Amino acid sequence: MTSQSQGIQQLLQAEKRAKDKLEEAKKRKGRRLKQAKEEATAEIDHYRLQREKEFRNKETNVMGSQGNFSAKIEEQTTEAIRNLTSSYHRNMESMMKKLLSTICDISPEIHPNFRPEV
């Protein structure tokens, strides 16, 4: 009987060791999965930063040229406004004289369709 109880004890101890090894393996697997996830996250972040940097460079190149267009358009608009203002000041006096002469110089005459009563 003692040999049976010793055999049972050995089986129980072997089962306990197997259970411990299984738990340790699960823990190692969990740690490895966590480590792999952290490495993947770091790699994704690095890739994202790299792509964002490339995007910003391309955006700067494109927007820089648009900025030049904007400056040119602003300059052309300012020049056009300056020309219109100078033209206004040059022609204002003569236009006012023509307008006043047309309004004030009235020459009364009979309308061509007027028929005097006989």
Image (cartoon, grey):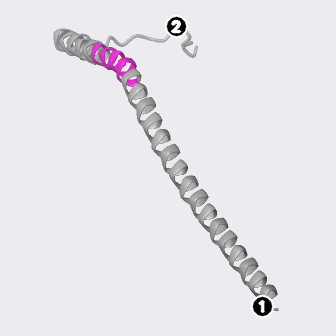
Count of numbered circles in the view: 2
Q: Residue at x 59, y 65 (%)?
A: 24
Mark 1 and mark 2 in contact (Cβ < 8 Å)?
no
Q: Nearer the viewer, residue 50 or 7?
A: 7
Q: Nearer the viewer, residue 40 or 103?
A: 40
Is 88 colored magenta in this rendering? no
Residue 49 is situated, as x and y percent measured from the top left of the image, at 41, 36
Could you tell me which quadrant the C terminus lies in? top right
The magenta segment? 59-72
The answer to which image quadrant residue 25 occupies is bottom right
Q: Residue at x 45, y 11 (%)?
A: 110
Is 62 colored magenta in this rendering? yes
Q: Specify the amino acid type for callout 1.
A: Thr
Q: CA distance from mark 2 to mark 1?
A: 149 Å
- Closest to the camera, between mark 2 and mark 1, is 1
In this view, 107 is above or below 25: above
Residue 43 is situated, as x and y percent measured from the top left of the image, at 48, 39
Q: Residue at x 18, y 12 (%)?
A: 86
Q: Earlier in the sequence, mark 2 or mark 1?
A: 1
Q: Disc 2 designates what residue?
A: 112
Callout 2: few (<14), some (14-19), or many (20+) C-alpha neighbours within 10 Å?
Answer: few
Q: Disc 1 designates what residue?
A: 2
Q: Nearer the viewer, residue 84 or 69?
A: 69
